[in-house]
Image: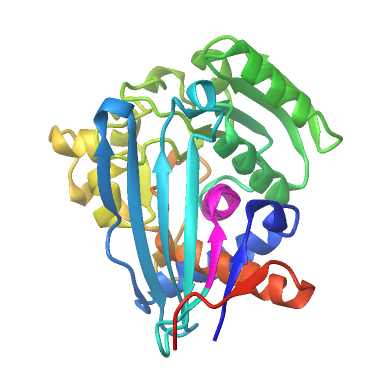
Amino acid sequence: METLILTGEEIKSRLSMSEVIGAVEQSFREKGLGRVQMPAKIYLFYSKYNGDLRAMPSYLESLDISAVKVVNVHPDNPLKYRLPTVMATIILIDPKNGYPLAIMDGTLITDMRTGAAGGIAAKYLARKDSKIIGMVGAGKQAETQLEALLSLYKKLEEVRVYSRSKERREAFVKKFNSSEIGEIIPVENVEEAVKNTDIIVTTTPSREPLVKDEWISMGTHFNCIGADAPGKQELEPKVLKRAKIVVDDWEQASHSGEINVPLAKGMISKEDIYGEIGEIVAGLKKGRIYDSEVTVFTSTGLAIQDAVTANLVYKKALDKGLGRFIKLIKE
């Protein structure tokens, strides 16, 4: 047996957001039905380098898909090392014998499966007529979040983009200045980005609340992506107190998602959490019920999302003859 090696360049442009959304939605359904093995991600903290590393194993039993991802988050990388903030490597495993079917760059996969999760959350939790989007953060994660919303809604009336970096928000606007968006506007503060919007997407590494409750209209949906490690938060806890809160995974979210700080401080409790997105996708719980609800999706990123997307990449690579095979393990 041989292992397929796939680089980021070989994976690039081979995935469409719509097919990743389909795969990730299936993984959420499997989790909701209790047919996955997925220990909470394990962290190593490189505090003196302002970074961390996570290990993420999973097995989707009925789909017979298994993988392990190792992924870092180093916010200083772009300026200091000209490297992405997030980099990942995924090993796709054959469940029947444990053999590594493929080793691949998981950086683009991470970006796309995270964007897909936001699109799925909006499908079930945002208003169907949502047209105005507020983006807080303008990095790679923000790009795939907007791609997923465009895949879902096809056309948006207005997108407002805030980033601390003027250059980054203007570059973001140029990248998405398309016929699918009526108007895309760079703004100079968070309030301008989020007031009177239908969906708010937060993708920053902030450890202090950025979005204030007083700015939020009834009926707003949040995709909270940035808070993915202990101590991180982007929303004022008052927002959570009046919202229907949906997490991707209770254990991960309670320690590292948008809810982790308010939980630790006793400002909210487990009883304030409505449920997991997998329960909603599987039809075990309802999503948005009333137009007036404020809904919050807390995304920490699940290993099952990586596994199904990596499996999709692997099948495409075999079909297109991409990558190269090496005899990694001696028989």
In this orientation, which residue lies closer to the viewer: 169 or 13? 13
Residue drawn at x 67%, y 69% is 324
Residue drawn at x 47%, y 84% is 64
Quadrant containing the C terminus is bottom left
- Residue range highlighted in magenta: 102-124
Left or right of residue 260, residue 79 in this image:
right
The answer to whether residue 282 is seen in the rendering is no
Residue drawn at x 39%, y 75% is 59
Residue drawn at x 68%, y 57% is 11
In this orientation, which residue lies closer to the viewer: 226 or 266? 226
In this orientation, which residue lies closer to the viewer: 299 or 240? 299
Residue 46 is situated, as x and y percent measured from the top left of the image, at 27, 35
The answer to whether residue 248 is seen in the rendering is yes
Left or right of residue 81, residue 259 in this image:
left
Residue 128 is situated, as x and y percent measured from the top left of the image, at 64, 48
Vertical comparison of 287 with 143: above or below: below
Figure coloring: rainbow
Residue 145 is situated, as x and y percent measured from the top left of the image, at 60, 42
Left or right of residue 66, residue 258 in this image:
left
Taking the magenta stretch, the answer to whether it contains residue 118 is yes
Quadrant containing the N terminus is bottom right
Vertical comparison of 90 with 331: above or below: above
Quarter of the rendering containing residue 75: top left
What's the magenta bit mostly, secondary-structure-wise? helix
Furthest residue in direction front, as rendered: 330
Residue 111 is situated, as x and y percent measured from the top left of the image, at 56, 47
